[in-house]
Amino acid sequence: MKFETSETNTTSGQTNNATLSYTVISSSGGILTLNFNVTTSEGNEGFGATVDANNNTVLSVSFSGQTLSGSEAKSIFDSFMTVFGLEETYSNEYGVLTDSAYFHSTGTAPQTFGTTTFDVTTWVANNLPETYSSCGITGTISDYTLNVGTPPGTSLTFITYLHVVESSPQTEDITFQLVSMTVA
């Protein structure tokens, strides 16, 4: 499998762009070896990871010439995987992003990402501006669109598009988009 995303984040007038990708290099008995690449205006950075998909465990991460394991490896892996919208890793956040108290589905339609097509459900805010409260944080959003779907051959729910404009607790304009996916 290969996944590529792009992300634009504007916070307090400062815009950052990034292209992120990862490729599953090998898979045997539930043990996955992955390569990650992040391209920003500051340059390229990459790392490798070995994951036990059977137990949802990060076995190791090779990053900046070091090989880490345990909680350090999981922390690095999770921080990169959140951008790919994996519900398995961030199921609590997925629930917040589709909480019916604030958001509703407008329907499902097939979409194509590179060579892969699958059904994607669109979520929008019930009202704009929308004030939400989650995990002790209250905020106000003035624009919101979320697209999620499950690629063929997987059981994972991916965020394929997310656009959020938030005016409090801080001003942010975030757009995340799945650019391409190849499912092996």
Image (cartoon, grey):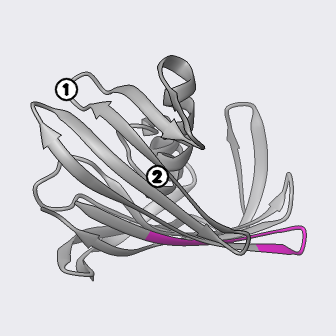
Question: Which region shows up in magenta?
Answer: 5-15
Foreground residue among 89 and 111: 89
Instruction: Indicate the amino acid at tag 2.
Output: Thr
Q: Nearer the viewer, residue 107 or 31?
A: 31
Can you say whether 48 is above or below 37 in the image?
above
Label 2 environment density (alpha carbons within 10 Å; few <14, some 14–19, many ≥20): some
- Disc 1 to disc 2, C-alpha distance: 27 Å
In the rendered image, residue 118, in percent from the top left (x then y), is placed at 19, 71
- Image quadrant holding the N terminus, namely bottom left
Task: Please identify the residue farthest to the front as the structure is shown.
Answer: 65
Mark identifier at residue 98: 2
Q: Is residue 85 magenta?
A: no
Q: Describe the element under mark 1 as helix, strand or loop.
A: loop
Q: Residue furthest top?
A: 70
**Residue 122's x, y, as percent?**
39, 70
Residue 9, image x, y percentages = 71, 69
Of 183 and 73, nearer the camera is 73
Q: Amino acid at mark 1?
A: Asn
What is the secondary structure assignment of the residue under circle 2? loop
At 19% across and 47% down in the image, what residue appears? 26
Provide the residue designation for mark 1.
Answer: 54
Instruction: Indicate the quadrant containing the C terminus: top left, top right, bottom left or bottom right.
Output: bottom left
Asked if the residue under mark 2 is in contact with the one under mark 1, i.e. CB atoms within 8 Å, the reply is: no
